[in-house]
Amino acid sequence: MPATAFIQMMKNPLKFKLFLFSRLPSAFFSGLKVKEIDETRCIVSVPYKWFTKNPFRSTYFACLAMAAEMSTGVQVMMHVYKSIPPVSMLVVRMEANYFKKAVGVTNFVSEDGILIKKTIDNAIQTGEAQKIVARSIGTNETGELIAEFFITWSFKAKKMNNQ
């Protein structure tokens, strides 16, 4: 099952670090980590450190956005992994609300895996582009709300050469 294989790959620390270093170097250097992943939910953490800080002694908003996007994007990648036909994916919009300064580890949780899968399946079945707004909630180590992101993904099944 492709989703299970993808999850195992993401849970392998060496493979995950190589993936980040080769495909998302800014996430690698920022110290993003996938703390939890299954077919319905993903948690990504971003630390507060020299590479992620801003002049106001908190985590730079772009680093928070990167972790929020990754919490939805890992789910997207899991559900398009080895799909037939292949499916293109693209972020087409992002909205964010910030509630509190991030001064430690911030964990972003997305629980939209099932909705993402249904939207991708619909794109494959209809052959038409489909969009979904995935939500990611960022909290600090004590559970206080730091930020809320809404990432709009667009999916389109690619045409196979023999069709």
Image (spheres, grey):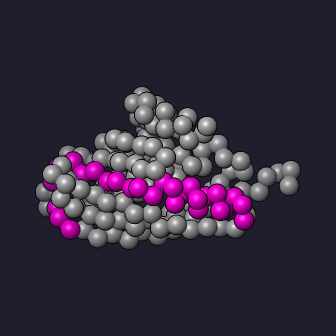
Residue farthest to the right, as pictured:
162
Where is residue 86 drawn, in percent x and y? Answer: 68, 50
Write the residue at 18% across / 49% down: 141
Q: Which residues are magenta?
A: 99-126
Relative to 89, 124 lies left or right: right
Look at the image and say whether residue 158 sits in the magenta stretch: no
Where's residue 82, x and y in %? 64, 42
Q: Quadrant of the C terminus?
A: bottom right
Number of numbered tags placed on the structure image: 0
Residue 66 visible to an observer of this rendering: no
Q: Is residue 56 left or right of residue 84?
A: left
Taking the image as drawn, is residue 162 in sight?
yes
Residue 49 sits above or below residue 129 on the image: above
Name the quadrant of the N terminus. top right
Front one among 122 and 17: 122
Going 72% across and 60% down the picture, which residue do you hit?
Answer: 125
Residue 69, horizontal then vertical, whole percent: 41, 57
Give percent across and percent down for residue 153.
52, 64
Residue 20, by quadrant, is top left
Q: Residue at x 61, y 67 (%)?
A: 130
Q: Is residue 143 left or right of residue 31?
A: left
Point 43% across, 30% down: residue = 12
